[in-house]
Structures are given as structure tokens and as C-alpha cells.
Image (cartoon, rainbow, N blue to C red):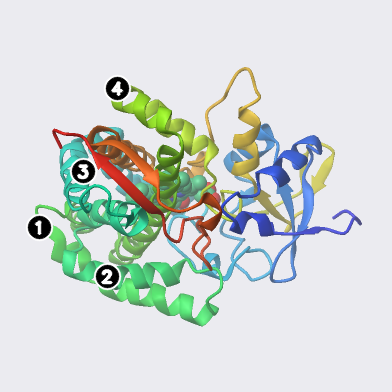
Amino acid sequence: MSSAEPAAFPFAESTTVEGAGARYRQLRQNQGPLPVRLPHGGTAWLVSRYEDVESVLRDPRFSRELAGDAVSEVMPSLLVRTSLLSLDAIDHDRIRACVAPLFTREAAEALRPRIRKLVRARTDAFPPDAHPFDGVAAYSLPVPVDVISEVLGVPAADREQFYLWADLAISSDALPAAVYAAHDDLLGYFATAPKQGADQPSAGLRTGLARMVDAGRLSHEAAVSLLPLLLVAGYETSVGQLGFYLLDLATRPEHHAALRQHPDRIPEAVTTYLRTVPYNVIGGALARVAREAVQIGSVTIAADETVIPSVEAANMQTLSMSSRPDHLSFGAGLHACLGSWLAQLELEEAVFGIASGFESIELAVELEELRLKEGSVVRSLQTLPLLARRTTDH
Ligand code: HEM
């Protein structure tokens, strides 16, 4: 590792509403991997060039499995061993192959009508026009929770408890023991889930998992540990994203009006949001550890050194690239987001719910008053005071 004094990572600006964009723009000029200092005292290489980020994500020489100790992980909550995200090649692929059919584009599309209804129930519950309300509590939080609970077959009565466990499970400042305990609680809750869910019409995923367990294609333990991962991975990020999309619609009325008039433009708008709205404080993907020496540009990453592939920096670079490659917000390679179709679809439906149901939404406070939720790896607004004006036919 270089002798230069490494910058502290995660960058402090990532925990502000503005984000660390300016910091990442500076990085772009210095394209090679940059040494950074992690909260646990370890060091890592921050990789920021688009091509390098994509190649780290796809390169099996960089292991998630090895990134499981305090000095190589970025935050305590990320130390928790979760199925899929902390496994390499063969074990990973075996589990992923079992659940992948449940998360295809077609499977997500089949849920669209149900998701539209869930979204509509939330917009119907907004207060009358001219009454300020919190867009996070009324919309950006409950919509993704409704969706993932629907997929996992979590009854409405249990959802409150779920926020608490899931919140703790991805907390960036809770003690590691509390984070582990929250994961255990989630595991405990789901311990019998594959069997229990089999007869519930809403529990498509659990039913699917149960079938795979029964057919001997997936172990009971693997099925059980997948469920909390899906819950946590499957809603917090969407909650954070949706809050920022609402903020954009509230502060750019012309954008809201354009999407209202042309709902067919919503999928592209969501793709742009995904490219430009940073979703966590670690710059996107999780840390990897090199299994052997790997050359990235002029830097040799030695075996056992940690690498952080910065999706946020890579996405930002695509904005000035004439070829405009795909954003990397859903990762790439082995660990590419399993829920990407579901996430894209629920975010489209959530934006559609606002664009079609409301003439306008407005911020009910000054922009400077907004704060991020504290102590979470995921970037999400604490509250979003809004005023909404319904369309006459809503
Ligand atoms: C806007 C929403 C979302 C974003 C931005 C997002 C982003 C990501 C990223 C970047 C990764 C790869 C992490 C890495 O390689 O270090 C990932 C993995 C994963 N995501 Fe998502 N995600 C979202 C929503 C969802 C949803 C809705 C689900 C599930 C229902 C989900 C389930 C997963 C799972 C299971 C993995 C691990 C895959 C594996 O290791 O094979 N995500 N996600």
C-alpha cells in the first residue's frame, strides 16, 4: 500500500443530504485506486474508475467471503455473515440458482397489478390537500415494506417489529452485538418460514423456497438465512431511493408535470434516478479482499488487501461519457442485485402513483432543514414534509 496518508472512509459528506458528489468528482481526476482508512483501523483501496469498478465486481480474484473480518469490512453491520452476499463461487451459485427464477423480470411483472394496488392504498391515505404530511412515513417507507412483505408473506401485524429488526441489522453505529442479535431475531422469525408460507397465496417466494427445500435443491438453513437478507436488502435501499425521488418531484415541478403527461417516460426516469441518487454511505458495493495480487492501472493490489469498488464514483463518470454505459447501481457479476427487476418495478409504480394521482407535490419546509436518517449504512431522508394536490379524478 502507498505511503501517502490515506483519507478516512466512508467520507463524512456521504452522511449529508447533499452527499459526497463533490468528493467523488475530485477522485475522478485521480483515476487509479486510492488508499483509504477504514473505521476499524484497517486500510483499503478505493476503486473509482468506471472500468475498474466493473472489473472488480466481476473478477473472481476479489472475494466477498474473505471480507468478513473487522479490518476489511467497512461497517459493523456489514460484518454479519449473510447468505449469498458473503459467499464466493460454488456455494453462492448453488443457492442463487435456486432463488433466481423467483426474481426474474417476468416474476416481477406478474406482481405489478398487486404492487399498483398497494401503492394506491398508500396515496389514498394521504391527508386532504393543503395538510402537510411526512412523505417518508406516509409513502417512501411503507411502499417498499408493503412490497417486500407481500413477497415474503409477512403479515401486516408483524411489520412494525420488522422495521425495528431490519433497522438495527443495517445500523452503522449500533454495537456489533446488537446488530448480530437483530440478525438472530430475524433468523428466528423466519426459522419455520418456508413451511409456514406454503399455503399463503401472498407468500409466493416462501412457497417457492418451500418447494425447493422439499425437492432437496436447497437446504432448510440456506432457505431460512435467505429470507432476512431479502428483507433487509429488499426494502431499505428502496426506501432511501424513493424518498429522494419524492424530493426531486417536489422541487422540480416541471419534471413532475412531464411524468404526469408522459407516464411512459417513468421507467427511464427511474433508471436516471438510480444512476444519480447515491444509495448508501459506502459508495455502493461492499468491500472485497484480493485472493492474489491483481494489477489495477498502475497499482498492484496485494493478496489479502481490501478493495472498495465505488459504484457512486463510477455512475457519476457515466454522466460525462458519450457512450453512457449502464449504471452499476445494481452491482455486476456474481453478486449483482437479485432484486433488481423488483426494485426497478416498485420504484416505477411508486413514481407512477405520485405522477398520476397528484397535480403537484411541494416541499413544506426549506430544503436546508432536511436531514438524513442517522446511523444507517443506507442513505435515506429522516423526514420529508410535503404538501400534495390531488388530481380531480383521484
Ligand atoms: C433500489 C433498490 C436496490 C439497490 C440499489 C440494490 C443494490 C444492490 C447491489 C449494489 C448489490 C450488490 C452488492 C455487492 O456486490 O457488493 C445488491 C445485491 C443484492 N440485492 Fe439489491 N438492491 C436493491 C433492491 C433489492 C431488492 C428489492 C431485493 C430483493 C428483493 C434485493 C436483493 C439483493 C440480494 C439478495 C443481493 C445479493 C445478491 C448476491 O450476492 O448474489 N435488492 N443489491
Report the residue marked by disc 2.
160
Report the residue marked by disc 3.
115
212 or 120, nearer to the observer: 120
Q: CA distance from mark 4 to mark 2?
A: 36 Å
Report the residue marked by disc 1.
200
Looking at the image, tell me whether mark 4 or mark 2 is earlier in sequence order: 2
Q: Measuring 44% from the left and 32% from the top, which residue is drawn there?
A: 271
Looking at the image, tell me whether mark 3 or mark 2 is earlier in sequence order: 3
* Label 2, ligand 1: CB separation under 8 Å: no
Identify residue type, mark 4.
Answer: Gln
Q: What crowding class fits label 3: few (fewer than 14 Cα within 10 Å), some (14-19), or many (20 or more)?
A: many
Query: Position of 180 compared to 97: left or right?
Result: right
Report the residue marked by disc 4.
261
Q: Measuring 52% from the left and 59% from the top, which residue is drawn there?
A: 371
Identify residue type, mark 2.
Answer: Glu
Which mark is nearer the camera, 4 or 1?
A: 4
Up/down of 361 relative to 189, above or below: above
* Place of residue 352 in the rendered image (x, y in percent of width and height, measured from the top left): 28, 35
Whether label 3 touches label 4, CB < 8 Å = no
Q: CA distance from mark 4 to mark 1?
A: 39 Å
Identify residue type, mark 1.
Answer: Gln
Circle 2: element type? helix
